[in-house]
Image (cartoon, rainbow, N blue to C red):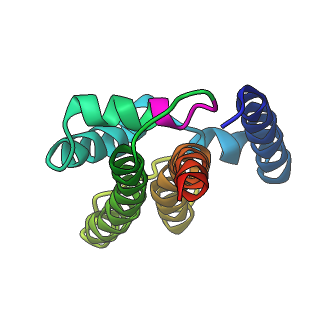
Amino acid sequence: MRKASVFYFIISLVVSVYLVRFALGPAVFGAIAPQIPGLCFIIFPVIFLLLTHFSPAEIITAFKLAGRKSKGTKSELKNAVLFFKTARQFFITIAVIGMIILWIWYLAGGFDAGNGPPKVAAAVMILVGAFLYPLLFILFICLPFGNAVQKKLNESE
């Protein structure tokens, strides 16, 4: 992975956020914009699940191996590819579980919109957030880092 890739990722993220904000308007965008508690419900379960399969040293090595100048054995590269595939699967699983829990909570009457948007619109915004955050982690972390390691593995064979 090249250092310029990080720059391109940041540009694409900023442009994406701007376009979504422009399309939805500030009020709706503010309701689905990343909020720390929502991110914690996604990040921490995935980290803990990854720790059941990989040691902290293996996780750090996987990220280091994505660097352009780093070298690793075939075994380390294969484990790094497996790490990013596993992370991607955990993010998808957490998104699906979050969607199910939010639907049950919504149907049980757990969301009171008050003076805000209608109850259905608010529930849809929550569901978009439940899918949006994991997909952004997959798009900006798992795929680029995993593909960089996969390219190194392909070159070593």
Inspect this view and state whether residue 116 appears. no
Tell me: residue 106, above or below residue 153: below
Q: Position of residue 97 (x, y in %)?
A: 29, 65
The N terminus lies in quadrant: top right
Residue occupying image coordinates x 47% and y 56%: 126
Residue occupying image coordinates x 57% and y 48%: 152
**Residue 48 quadrant:** top left
Residue occupying image coordinates x 21% and y 49%: 49
Tell me: residue 115, above or below residue 58: below
Residue occupying image coordinates x 37% and y 52%: 87
In this rendered view, identify the residue nearer to me: 143 or 14.
143
In this rendered view, identify the residue nearer to me: 109 or 28.
28
**Is residue 43 shown left or right of residue 71?**
left
Tell me: residue 93, above or below residue 40: below
**Residue 11 quadrant:** top right
In this rendered view, identify the residue nearer to me: 132 or 47.
47
Point out the stretch of residues depicted in magenta: 64-68
